[in-house]
Each structure stands twice: as C-alpha cells, then as structure tokens.
Amino acid sequence: MKIKNILDRFEKQIDPFFSNRKHLSKYSLRNQRQDIDSIIVYFKKNISKELNIDSIRKFISESKSNKSDASIRRIISNLKIYFEFLLEKKILSKNFFSEISTPKAEKKLPSIATTEEIDKMISLIDISSNLGKRDHAIIEFIYSAGLRVSEVNGLNLNDIDTKINQAIIFGKGSKYRSVIFSNSTSKVLKKYLNIRSNQNSKEQAFFLSKSGSRLSIRSIQHIVKKYINLAELNPNYHTHTLRHSFATHLLDGGADLRVVQELLGHTSPKTTEIYTHISVEKSRDVYTKAHPKA
C-alpha cells in the first residue's frame, strides 16, 4: 500500500481519534500528538514508500538516532494505539506496530538520601522566617509520610489532623489513602499552621504561595531542589527522592512490605519491592567494604 494513497485520510483521522482521548492528561495528549505528527512528517519525506513492516521499522530506526529508549517505547505504544484506531476505521488493513518489539526498560534503582543528608537539608532552612516555616513543613511532611509532589500540591486544610498525626491523601488513580506522620513532624506542621492562618482564610489549600494561593507542583519541586543544592547533595536528588528514602528507611528499619505498600499507595506489591532491592544493594555494599573475605 503506497503511502501517498492514504496519507490524507491518515491525517484526517487525527481529530476524531483525539475526540475520544479527553480522559488523558494534557501531557499524554501532547506526547501522542507529537508522536503521530512525527510519523506523518517521516512519510511525507518518503512519500513513495510502501506502508509495510519494513518502512515502519525504518521509521523506528531513524527515530532512535536522536531519541532515548524511553521515548522510543512511548512512540511505539502511542502509534500502536493510533494504528489500531485506523484499523477500526478501515483506513488500514493491518496494525504494523503490533509486530514491533519495544526496547526493554533498563531497571534503575532510585537514588536514596541518607537520614544524615535529609537532616542536613533541613538544618539549612531559615525557620525564623514564615517561608522557612513553610519550606520546613513541606520537606518534613513529604519525608515523614512518603508523599508524591502532586499529593502535597492537592492537600487541603481538612485533610490533615495534627492531633492524631494522620492525613487523608488523594493519590494516584484518584484513590484516597490514610497516612501517618511522626510527632516531630506534627510540631513542624503546627508551627506552619500558626503563620498560615494569617495568609488567606478563604483558601483551602494547605500549602500556600507568597500570594496566598495554592502552591504549585513546580514551586514545591523548586523548594525541595533549593535545599538539596544548598546542602550540596547528589545533584540527581529531587522531590521524589524523599519518598524513595521514606520507603527504604522503613524497610531498613524492619517494616513489613505490605504496610509500606499501603502507606505509599501502591496497588501492587511488585511496585514496592524495588525498595527491597535497594536494601539488598546497600547490604551488599556494606558487606563488600567491611568483610575481610569480600
């Protein structure tokens, strides 16, 4: 099947395709459109080609020259979905992306901060200022409860109970879960609440910006990164490092995997098991350095 014979219909199906994808995030939609556009641009440059498994493989091969394996996996996944849509619309007679194998994801263990490193970050916060009290509360709370940055962003005043050290979190997959935090974290949160009450009584968000509005995800990330840099820690550390550290430190302390899974809000224990691997690697490193026969 010649590309030039179907390219026009190929393009005309983009809008109908996306009319059924409104449930996705704006980032997913953006990536899908970019990936569809990329193959259209490729075939416009190679208008005389046949649409077959060989031309699809050639497109993937050329894409690999300037894209990561993660991007290639995403491109294959997104175009497989789009080609399936074109198959249903009888634009195509075959979904060639079903025959394309995706590069295997390299399993990387997340970076983990030590308790000493986290303490160093916190020690550099100017807690005499109102913003310092807020920043202190953010970092303490993320680490103490193992939160995602989106969960911190979504926190409201009535979600946190400092009397019983418990919070209700609206997490991934639009699911609620209960988390607990320490007495020391509760004290930090109370100090922040004392100054927060003077900012904006109508705003329900727990963490506020200077202007009194809900603190954005990007601002939270910037705050955490600020103290990582001030403490001169691993430049690869980021907001999620605090969540990774929370889980690993719990398991190192003897916590049950199932309990850690529930606190993190993971639907599958397999997702949480990565932290057991981190603990094993840490033990291996200690063994190699300390044992005379290692």
Image (cartoon, rainbow, N blue to C red):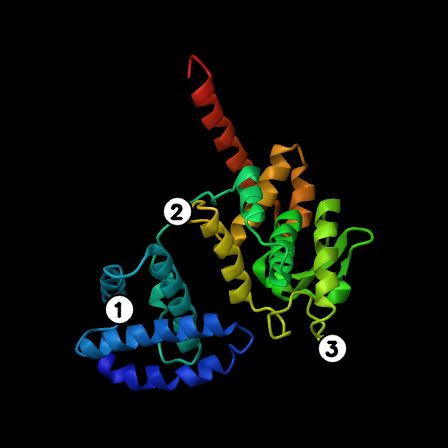
Q: How many residues crowd around disc 1 within 10 Å: few (fewer than 14), some, or many (20 or more)?
A: some
Which x, y percent locates residue 245?
56, 43
Residue marked by disc 1: 52
Q: Nearer the viewer, residue 193 or 247?
A: 193
Tell me, yes or no, if residue 220 can be seen here.
Answer: yes
The quadrant in which residue 11 appears is bottom left
- At label 1, the amino acid type is Asn
Judging from the image, what secondary structure is the residue with disc 2 in? loop
Which x, y percent locates residue 1?
25, 76
Q: Nearer the viewer, mark 3 or mark 2?
A: 3
Q: CA distance from mark 2 to mark 1?
A: 29 Å
- At label 3, the amino acid type is Lys
The answer to whether 43 appears left or right of 11 in the picture is left
Judging from the image, what secondary structure is the residue with disc 1 in? loop
Residue in the picture at 53% in, 54% down: 239
Q: CA distance from mark 3 to mark 1?
A: 60 Å
Most extreme residue toward the top is 292
Residue marked by disc 3: 202
Work out whether 236 lies above or below 66: above
Q: Nearer the viewer, mark 3 or mark 1?
A: 3
Residue in the picture at 70% in, 66% down: 196
Residue in the picture at 38% in, 72% down: 83
Q: Nearer the viewer, residue 196 or 152?
A: 196
The answer to whether 115 appears left or right of 55 in the picture is right
Judging from the image, what secondary structure is the residue with disc 3 in? loop
Work out whether 79 lies above or below 188: below
Q: How many residues crowd around disc 2 within 10 Å: few (fewer than 14), some, or many (20 or more)?
A: few
Q: Which mark is residue 283?
A: none
The quadrant in which residue 77 appears is bottom left
